Image (tube, helix red, strand yellow):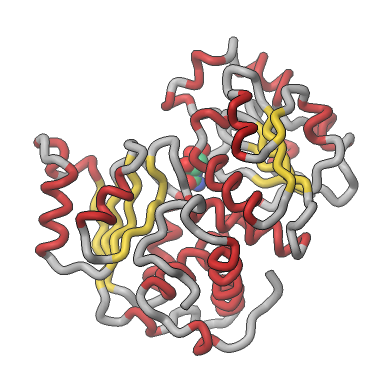
Amino acid sequence: MILKNKDVLGLESLEADEILGVLEIASRFRAVFDRPVRNVPIMRGRTVVNFFHEPSTRTRISFELAEKRLSADIVNFSAANSSFKKGETLRDTAENLAAMKIDMLVVRHSSPGSARYLAQVLDCSVINAGDGAHEHPTQGLLDIMTMRQRLGDLRGRKVTIIGDIAHSRVARSNIWGLTKLGAEVTLCGPPTMVPGALERMGVVVEYDLHRAVADADVLNVLRIQLERGAGKTFPGNREYHRMYGITEDIVRGLKPEAFILHPGPMNRDVEIAGEVADGPRQVILDQVANGVAVRMALIYLLSGGDPGALGGSDKG
Ligand code: NCD
């Protein structure tokens, strides 16, 4: 059994061997992508509800594609046209979902802890697709998968996460996952966005960008989360770009094999220069492709899929 619990709520609650087990299954699904027929009938007759209470493009499409490629029946539920507008509570929604007998719930919500709450009140499996600034475990897993495809074992590898760490669920999931796998994590950004207390998570905090990236193997560049109030923590986009933006100049100072991740959506020319976002060091579309594979793996494993039944894997 690769996953010990019925839900995936964060990388804090997954052990290193669970993370590696999921990534192994994900790499087998990734190998299916290059075949002319990409669908497998594993989830036929099972219903997955995608419950998105916050805007999302990539993550929602990625989950939907993963579910479709596993042949699940899908119901999409977005807050914009739901009873939330009429004042329904999360608990009432949960009870209604339970009564409708679904097999799995994928939830994105602006409140930290909302996925855990739903996991407690529902018998079905719950996957957290991002809960406020808390965790975004599938993004953490797809980032780690992308890093391992290039670097193999991450023990002793240096990963620098840059940007609005305080508001970032992506950063938190990356920190948990990467440190469990033995990577050395450095956080960098303006002091207003990178609280020094984060060092308690077993990472280094470095406010000087040049020093933070000098010997990094990987840069994970985060979006400035304007919708979570980040605009108040720095003087302006131009100022941020000058101090912490990943520019061609910064790239020239990196180790020759170092590469760059960004979870999307990007603020071009704020946290990352347009040329870098389109340049040879970025692996952003690998991340997107791996995202579908990671989500297929989680859905497969949570619904009782047999890890041995999938055949050989590609690298990663
Ligand atoms: C992230 C998110 O929503 O947390 N995006 C994503 O899922 N691809 C990061 C972000 O919004 O900046």
In this rendering, would 87 be left or right of 30?
A: left
The answer to whether 120 appears left or right of 221 in the picture is: left
Q: Determine if residue 274 is in view.
A: no
Nearer-the-camera pick, 31 or 10: 10
Task: Judge whether 46 appears above or below 9 on screen.
Answer: below
Label tally: 0
Q: Residue farthest to the top? A: 235
Q: Dividing the image into 4 quarters, which one contains the C terminus? A: bottom right
Residue 172, quarter of the rendered image: top right
Residue under the point 51% across and 35% down = 168
Where is residue 39 shown, x and y percent of the image?
Answer: 44, 80
Residue 267 % position (x, y): 58, 32
Q: Residue at x 57, y 31 (%)?
A: 165
Q: Residue at x 58, y 73 (%)?
A: 30
Q: Does the image show residue 267? A: yes
- In the rendered image, residue 301, in percent from the top left (x then y), is placed at 43, 74
- Residue positioned 70% across, 29% down in the render: 205
In the image as oriented, which residue stretches furthest toward the front? 200
Q: Position of residue 143 (x, y in %)?
A: 61, 53
Q: Is residue 250 above or below residue 129?
A: above
Asked whether 251 or 100 is in front, the reply is 100
Q: Quadrant of residue 16?
A: bottom right
